[in-house]
Amino acid sequence: MNVRHPEKINRQSNPIPKKPYWIRVKAPISNLFKKTRDIVKKNQLTTVCEEASCPNISECWQKKHATFMILGDTCTRACSFCNVKTGRPNNVDQFEPYKISNAVKELGLKHVVITSVDRDDLEDGGAQHFVNVINSLRKNCPTTTIEILTPDFLKKPIAKNILELSLPDVFNHNLETVPRLYATIRPGSRYFVSLELLHDMKKRKSSLFTKSGLMVGLGEKKEEIYQVMDDLRSADVDFLTIGQYLQPTEKHAKLEKFVTPEEFENYKAMAYAKGFLMVSSSPLTRSSYHASEDFSIMKIAREKNTLSN
């Protein structure tokens, strides 16, 4: 039986601070929100919007935008920042690629983001399932651009070769935080393994857009964020997202600070100065937030960059 966060039960309780005015969001009420929810439920799909308690679900679903989470709703890891449940995953749904493409067609998505839980129980970490979803989307939604947000595929050496068989338009993998905090925030992952994944996927196809994201407010220092930016640029990553960490429960990692909108703007300016093609940095920024619009901007930025060179 799946248990939500069994590893978190005995963790120290961290009171959740009151959110500042700039980070509060409206409750979902529109008919379009309900229509999106109904399409997701009808196709028996999981979304990271719901599982990770995304603060932008109201805005995105009212635009009929949803980020699909494949390979089940149960993760084999227990990162201290994440609200997705941990446990023994169910068998992979072989019909999921078709369900995804059907929902994307119904929603009329021009750009879709596909993510997943960690599946350390699978030999390839779920890489072939990502490819199956991409192939189904290419066949049934040929005008839709595809972005995948993958796990790190730690100790899954065949994963990269499998992914190369059918690459998306955007390859996204989040570093999440600075190296110093990995032991407590992302204990099942390795910082340089994640960097290497981003670097290797770009080497396999130079025209592939690569993307990564960070949370702030976990106790990181400004200079550490700048160093991560440098590391990502060394890996030739094109796009960076920076958003506020929001503590899901008292058993999750302690929220150390609410970063101000002005600080997010400073991070954005620094990231652009370091050479990223596109930067999204704000309290409510998430990996797939405004992903469709951002993809268009990335394409324009690359074209301008190519012309200038």
Image (cartoon, rainbow, N blue to C red):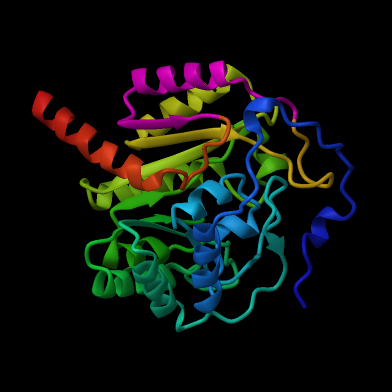
Left-right relation of 283 to 227: right
Asked if residue 266 lies in the magenta stretch, the reply is: yes
Could you say which quadrant of the image residue 283 lies in? top right
Q: At x 65% / y 52%, what residue is drawn?
A: 53
Quarter the C terminus occupies: top left
Q: Nearer the viewer, residue 188 or 252?
A: 252
Q: Kindly identify the residue that appears in the image at 69 percent across and 31 percent down.
A: 218
- The residue lying toward the viewer, choosing from 162 and 65, is 65
Residue at position x 22%, y 46% from top?
206
Q: Position of residue 18 (x, y in %)?
A: 79, 31
Residue at image coords 83%, 47% = 251
The range drawn in magenta is 256-282
Q: Is residue 125 above or below residue 11?
A: below
Residue 253 forms part of the magenta stretch: no
Q: Can residue 309 be seen by looking at this rendering?
A: no
Percent x, y of residue 281? 48, 29
Q: Where is residue 298 shown, x and y percent of the image?
A: 28, 38
